[in-house]
Amino acid sequence: MTKAKISRMQYFLLIPNLLFPKAIGITAGVTARRVGGDAWTAMSIGFVVGASILLLMILLSSKFPNLTLIGIADQVLGKWPSKLVGLVLLIFFIIGFAVSANVMTLHLKEYFLIETPFIIICLIYILLCMYGVALGVENIIRYALLGFLGCLLINITMVFGTINDFEWINFLPVFDRGLMANIAGSIYVLGDLALAIMAIGMIFPMLNDSNKAGWLTFWALATSAVIIMIWPILELGVMGAGAMEQYVVVCMQQIRCAQLTRFLPRYELIMVFFFTFATFVQSATLYFCAVYSVKQTISVKKDWYIVVPLAFVLLPVTYFMARDHNDYVNFLDYPWSQICTALSIGIPLLLFIIALVRGQLMKDNQSAAGSSSA
């Protein structure tokens, strides 16, 4: 892997940053289009399932603490199957970056920089993330503290700004679409959790103390669930399901409903300022994971041989994914969420079962880095 190390606190703060931006910005609206007022219950179900898979990933990674997900595949499946896993992860992280980046680009394009060509916004954001990756992932993760504080400030101001307009009647009837529809609708938040599951699979070897990493991850997920689930609950209570379904960036409509004081009736720009740090951490971390997927799959030594050329791939993917926001939402609805669910459940579970059958989970793999983690 890389010689960079992160502390337990940085690891704890990273997880909310990997989940928060897209979950509040886009996912709640996409879920509401499918299950209406049951968006919050469907997302809750998705969190439980996704958290279980992430904890399984942590259990698997803790048995191979010096290896990334690709390195684990090399140990469990062999050289050539691991290269296939690396290729799949590369494609996943490229598309995942574009999905994350367009959370920010659509905020800017649709609310602040309406006349600016969308490709320019995409280019500037990709260059920013590329600069962060060039400085090193440990520098990116340091921003997780600012991202987490920004998430808290957004939540506090949003709650106090909208609580007077909250209507409990908007929640009735609960499970209006039925349990099976809620389970099916939970697939959209699994798309967000899949980004964290795969990213943690790549970053886990950087953790300088993996003792009780499962509990640390559990509490990070619990914290993330609280600060994220506040949004669909408040959005439903304030705007109602009908309004949630109408907007791509539904969190901005919720912010437009907020009135903090008589003299600050709207604060979209302040919200985006707080929101930017977490989104940058999420996007740049996925960029880093894409770089290291290439590096470990084809054994490239120099990061710069990958970082800059990869930007030329990320730009068209990011631009064409969301130049029409309806195409972006339709892509998240199908097939992105389904792909995320299949990969985030399938890869960790497959590796875990094969390693268990081969008895590799019982071995001491502390020194199993070898060429796979180079």
Image: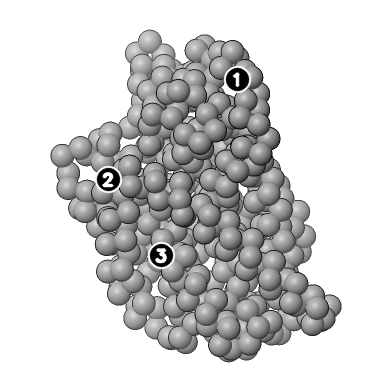
Q: Which residue is drawn at 33% across and 32% down?
A: 269
| Separation (CA) of disc 2 from disc 1 | 31 Å
Where does the image place residue 357, in percent across and percent down from the top left? 80, 78
Report which residue position mark 1 lands on.
171
Horizontal side of residue 234 vs 349, given as left or right: left
Q: Which residue type carries mark 1? A: Phe
Report which residue position mark 2 lands on.
324
What color scheme is it? one colour
Q: Which of marks 1 and 3 is nearer the N terminus?
A: 3
Q: Which of marks 3 and 2 is nearer the N terminus?
A: 3
Q: Which residue type carries mark 2? A: Asp
Horizontal side of residue 367 vs 307, given as left or right: right
Report which residue position mark 3 lands on.
94
Where does the image place residue 335, in percent across and percent down from the top left? 46, 54
Q: Is mark 1 on a helix, strand or loop?
A: helix
Q: Which of marks 2 and 1 is nearer the N terminus?
A: 1
Mark in the foreground, 3 or 2 = 2
Where does the image place residue 120, in percent across and percent down from the top left? 20, 53
**The N terminus appears in which quarter of the rendering?**
bottom right
| Separation (CA) of disc 3 from disc 2 | 19 Å
